[in-house]
Image: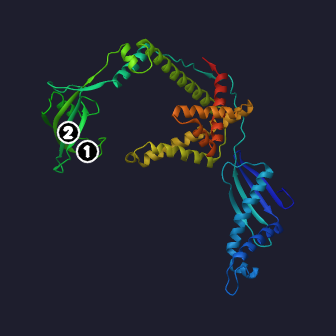
Amino acid sequence: MTETTERLKSGVKDLSPSRKEIEIELRADEAEKEHEIVLERFAQRARLKGFRPGKAPKDMVLQVYHQDIHHTLIDTLVPKVLEEVLAAHQIHPVSAPVVEDLSFDCGQPLKFKALVEIWPLFVLPAYKKIKSARKEAVVTEADMDKTVEELRQKAAEYVPVEGRAVVAGDYVAVELQGRDLKRKRMRPLEKTVLLAGHEGNDKELNDHVLGLQPGQAADFRVDYPADAANKALAGREIDYHLKVISIKAQKLPEINDDFAKSLGEYESLSDLREKIRQELLKARETAARRETSEDVLRQLVAQTDIDLPPTVIDEEADSILRKMAEQIPPQAVSPQLVEQLRAGAREQAVANLKRTLLLRRIAEAERLAVAEDEVDEEIQALARSNGIPAARLMDSFNAEGRRESLKTTLLLRKSIDFVVGQSIME
């Protein structure tokens, strides 16, 4: 071991590029000083029979509270000594150090080992002139036609229909009651509105509602498979009685200048189509840049060998797994799915951490930085996009300590933009 200070010895052993073992020894007289401080605190609070609070002899307090004093001393002294040693060796842990082989008795040195995980050093790959396939952002007339039609469908009105039967595309108010043939029980009467002919309806329902007029009814049977989406009906055979109450037909506006003007500040249909073209082009250019960034980063990660700290991988994988679990219905969870998700989360965790380390190193190499006014601009942009007062969001970022995290995100974004800007599009 090397002498860190006159009072403290320590030695560092590299277990791997991301793990170190530190052996530490604090001189006996230094440990005893801390022991006296802890004993004094206990003596001030001790309540022993025959003595007023704080007046019991220290040797008696030590005899009664020996174990508590020992544990308190260790809990106080070990972190303090470890922090001093880490600072002396300029070691910056990325997770909580693990203390092992601890030994200490009164009059003896304090000895222990600490296992520490750090961000590893690694060789940056050649991150300039990376080749990537060119992604073209193109908007066709058919794309604009599709968007205009979607706007037309959203602007549709539904008007009452009389004198005819249900046709596909009608919104139909119905009464529907089923009888479970196996349980021989009636199901609750449902009053609902359905879109006739919609693919999400049971085929039998579509077949029987089409052609009915208000006041008319139909009976039909549905034999649900065991894997039906509606678990309450899975594997059951239900007899239904359906009665049509009313019909509303879809009335679509004509696609013309008046339709365009009704949607907002558009002077004509051609003006609307041009705005649609610009928005689609902007979205596709953003998607193309994102795809290019992903391709370039994948190549960088594949070329880089980084020994990541195991604990950090576990923490990142757990975070990813929790987000995955939020998207899955509880009834769909199975042991096999959990294992599959866990493996995917771990793979994603490794990729995420490698990307972050690479981008940080590139930022250092290229001396990229984020100014405070750039952070302010980003917060203001977030406020605009979410309809939040900028001052309120600014206060929130400053008060909750989120500003530094946002600054890091912007720095990583700058690194990505730099690498993509240096890449060769083929």
- For the question of whether residue 226 can be seen, the reply is yes
In the rendering, at what x and y percent does residue 162 appear?
16, 26
Please give left or right for residue 175 compared with residue 251 in the image. Answer: left
The residue that disc 2 covers is 222
Gap in Å between the C-alphas at discs 2 and 1? 10 Å
Residues at badges 2 and 1 in contact (C-beta under 8 Å)? yes
Q: Looking at the picture, tell me which residue is in the foreground, 311 or 367.
A: 367
- What is the three-letter code of the residue carrying label 1? Leu
The vertical placement of 264 against 189, above or below, is above
Which residue occupies 63% across, 31% down? 377
| Circle nearer the N terminus (2, 1) | 2
- What is the three-letter code of the residue carrying label 2? Val
In the rendering, at what x and y percent does residue 206 appear?
21, 31
The residue that disc 1 covers is 233
In the rendering, at what x and y percent does residue 336 appear?
43, 46
How many residues crowd around disc 1 within 10 Å: few (fewer than 14), some, or many (20 or more)?
some
In the rendering, at what x and y percent does residue 246 appear?
19, 32
Quarter containing the C terminus: top right
